[in-house]
Amino acid sequence: MNKLKSRTFIQSLFLLILLSAISSCVKERFYAKPTELSFGTDTIWFDTVFTRDPNSQYPISVTRITTIKNKENLPVKANFDLRGGSNSPFRINVNGFSGTQLSDIEILPGDSLFVFIQCKLTANNQTQPMLVLDSLIATVNGASSKLLLAAYGWDAHYMRRPIIASNTTWDDNTKPYVIIDTLYVANGTTLTIKPGVQIFASAYTPMYIAGSLSIEGTADQRVKIRGDKPTFIPSILPNQWTGIHFLKGSKNNKISFADITNASVGVRVDSFDIPNSPVIVLESTRIQFCGQICLLGITGAIEATNCLFADAGSYTFLGFLGGNYSFNHCTFAEYSGFSGRQNGSFGFTNTQRDGLGNLIGFEDLNLSVYNSIIYGYNKEEIQFDQTTKADFTININNNLVRSQNPQAVLGSGNFLNQAPKFKQANQGEYALDTLSPAYSKGILFKNPVITDILGASRKSTPDLGCFERKP
């Protein structure tokens, strides 16, 4: 019985070796007739891409991805050619091979390959984005398939590590300003940004303000500051750049009708010794889609009216280690889901503590919040820490707030835990929808606020928050 099993095993092994030898002598067969491949889409759009900084490899576009499929039951060998050849602004990568012309790329039966595409555009000397076109042709045995490639090339003013050492004005609203690396405004110097100017910051770029910053947007021509990937939807890309940092000693700063988005910390204000007047005044400004904090004050002095602070990984506002803060008709909203935060998104302290919770510093805090909305997906959206060793003066009155804190902490006249009915909070749209409880609930605080964040007129009894809803 054992001899029979042994003989059977030897015969089976011999048969496997024979079959392997025969198969190794058979040439791999490829589909020999013309056949069209199937691209995953008919057009790749790059939307808007900055043209090249002279004598630089900056910038390179984002990478677009599509697929190409072999629908036959045999493998094929495909050639890929950019119609513009070596002069094409586009570059492709297929199955790990890159260039403008690729040959004999094998695609297995019924299989697909990824096609990666980038573009590098030269300056076009135009004031508006200019359309650039090319085609990617895939050929199998004489049969061709075409993918259209399109991008808008936008010339820009490139500012590489700019140091603003004398009073400077940026006023060209036809071409954007692109900051590469770090911007620094020196002490005693003012950088003025005029209506309609667009500013893009490269990755990790901070804007340090030791002197003064004056952003003079208008309702019709807002100033926009964001990361340098104009193709991308802002809401999906926080942390594209560092943010605007007002250093200790900076003064006479004002930002009006600006959109500051996609930073790590949108605006940071370091005052430390609290002045009598605000270090910065914010009016009708949006700070949104920040990876960490929209507005940060460290013993800061900030006054804000008609502003939106929304969608941040940790805080829409954090007043740390005391400071003077005044908010009127502002909206603080956090629905981004950028992080799994457990704490409230609106925070303030008159303390500084170490990692063990021990008090190591304290400064007076004076916080006023009127006619505003503080809301998000947590049951508690207000977080604070205090010590009796420094003043802790809080006036949070006549606001729509999501909080479980007692009225003794928040102040009187607030509307607690009533959903504000934003239009589309999950898409970063915080205008008020119909039947919002914030409608016509505003009261007079300091000077009358007669317009909203968009410059629209407010009613005699205005709405809470930065947006005014028309009846």
Image (cartoon, rainbow, N blue to C red):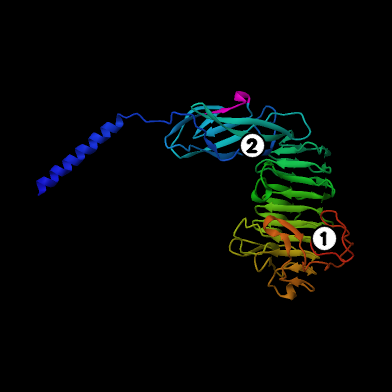
Are the two marked residues, 2 and 1, in contact with CB atoms closer than 8 angstroms? no
State whether residue 328 is above or below residue 48.
below
Residue 83 is covered by the magenta coloring = yes
- N-terminal of the two: label 2 or label 1? 2
Please, what secondary structure does the residue beneath circle 2 have?
Answer: loop
* Mark 2: few/some/many CA within 10 Å (<14, 14-19, 20+): many
Position of residue 309 in the picture relative to residue 450 (left or right)? left
**Which of these two is toward me, 325 or 227?**
227
Query: Residue 160: where, in percent of width, then height?
Result: 71, 35
- The answer to whether residue 350 of the structure is visible from this angle is no
State whether residue 451 is above or below residue 169.
below
The tag on residue 61 is: 2
What amino acid does circle 1 point to?
Glu
Residue 359, picture quadrant: bottom right
Residue 452, picture quadrant: bottom right
Name the residue furthest front. 33
**Cα gap from disc 2 to disc 1, whole angstroms:** 38 Å
Query: Residue 238: where, in percent of width, then height?
Result: 65, 50
| Count of residue discs | 2
Could you tell me which residue is drawn at 67 percent across and 40 percent down? 202
Query: Residue 105: where, in percent of width, then height?
Result: 47, 31
Question: What residue range appears in magenta?
Answer: 79-87
Position of residue 8 in the picture relative to residue 451 (left or right)? left
Q: Circle 1 sits on which residue?
A: 468
Position of residue 118 in the picture relative to residue 276 (left or right)? left
Position of residue 362 in the picture relative to residue 196 (left or right)? left
- The answer to whether residue 312 of the structure is visible from this angle is yes
What amino acid does circle 2 point to?
Ser
